[in-house]
Image (cartoon, rainbow, N blue to C red):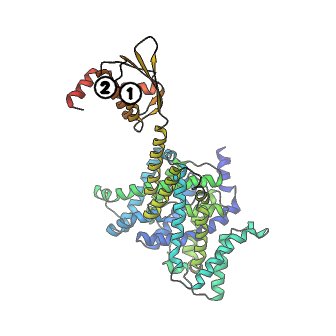
Amino acid sequence: MLLLSTKEEWFGNVRGDILAGIVVALALIPEAIAFSIIAGVDPKVGLYASFCIATVIAFVGGRAGMISAATGAMALLMVTLVKEHGLEYLLAATVLTGMLQIAAGYLKLGVLMSFVSRTVVVGFVNALAILIFMAQLPELTNVTWHVYALTAAGLAIIYLFPHIPRIGSLVPSPLVTIVVLTLVVLVMGIDVRTVGDMGEMPDTLPVFLWPEVPLDFETLAIIFPYSAALAAVGLLESFMTATIVDDMTDTDSDKNREAKGQGIANIASGCMGGMAGCAMIGQSVINIKSGGRGRLSTLIAGVLLLVMVVFMSDLIKIIPMAALVAVMIMVSIGTFSWPSVKGLKTLPLSTNIVMIATTGVVVATHNLALGVLTGVLLASLFFANKISHLMYWDTSYEKGSDTRIYKFFGQIFFNSADRFADAFDYKENAKQIVIDVTHAHFWDITAVYALDKAVIKLRNMGKHVEVIGQNEATQTIIDRFGIHDKPEEIKKMMDTGH
């Protein structure tokens, strides 16, 4: 079974994976160079990182067909470290990042994705689509009309070529776009910005180099905050990307294996002179839309990237940036969730607020983790508010006796605890009070505190109070934290003035 699934992951879509891998490799080159510039390091640092991470993750990652390499989100976190301490400390931080991610995989932190609602994922995706588009704007400002013409022609080829009978489905349209526009620029001698203008290409293969930093606590104190941030953002973006590719391909992925894989890939990158990286939504979408489905596409993208920049740099340098801009605009259009815009009219207000807030924070700060954290926090608050309103109660007198029965239904926790405590009429004449929680559930200490408050207050009014119907979980939390049946605890609380 394992052999069959491994064979399917590697060789189930050979032609599609090879062609998609070529497209991804070409699109990775300018991005890796651009991210190196953002981080303040030599272009080869980003290129070596993209090669190492893509190649290693093809074997150890938890999601076939997903592309991992140097990314802008990670590059932004490195700027201060590089500026203040230099490249060697960045390489050390990259190795530590990998170690932290492997630990996260063994701790099974992939389960945290279950706390990220679909609405947050949509907001995150929309933000990335906007950021991908915005990243292309520098290539479209203060340029000649040729750039706009080439970009428009590139988009026309991308969207129209697949409709050509027979041949349209054989070759990925982004690859056709890159080849055709490069030939047009060469033949017509058009003077436009090319990949070669982005920076110097490396002319040697990467070699194993342990970061030259002192192995002491002082070094750890410097790099740990950066490594922790890089590990968190890297895993978050990788998990998000895996979820999106899962949806696009209708398949499942192993998030904990992905965490370990990202860690191994980053350790390899740091020891090969590369910066930390993670999964890339844009490149993964290019891969999937170009027909890539298996691990072979990721391996081809990584290996071919290095082969091209080291041995075919003269050819790569002449690719016009307009061709790659067209491909990335296609990615941003394909990544953006257009149904979510239509849904603004029909979806609940709370859902729209979560999605827009996630998108807005990511776009404004360029911090993916902060945006997702905002979305998760808002979604949790809205959920808690909604659940708290499902808590209600009913009161009745027991016939033939002076007993008032309070029956509670629903969830009692921090957001509904005050309503629980306010449900009682503390000045009524009944001498016997029965609090029936058969159909209720106590979730936290705040709920137990509300029960204590009500019971103690009623008893101080001279009433006999009995709590019945606790389920096992409710009984456990009341026994552990409740004090209404513990006179010594009540006395202690009174003495301290609480």
- Residue beneath the point at 40% across and 14% down: 402
Give how far across and how far down residue 136 sits, in percent: 53, 73
Q: Are marks 1 and 2 in contact (CB under 8 Å)?
A: yes
Give how far across and how far down residue 152 sits, in percent: 63, 77
How many residues crowd mark 1 within 10 Å: few (<14), some (14–19), many (20+)?
Answer: some
Q: Where, quadrant-wise, is the N terminus in this rendering?
A: top right
Q: Which mark is residue 405?
A: none
Q: What element carries label 2?
A: helix
- The amino acid sitting under disc 1 is Phe
Farthest-out residue, bottom:
189
**Of 21 and 355, which appears nearest the observer?**
355
**Of 90 and 356, which appears nearest the observer?**
356
- The amino acid sitting under disc 2 is Lys
Q: Earlier in the sequence, mark 1 or mark 2?
A: 1
Q: Name the residue under label 2.
A: 457
Q: Name the residue under label 1.
A: 424
Can residue 34 be seen at all in this image of the molecule? Answer: yes
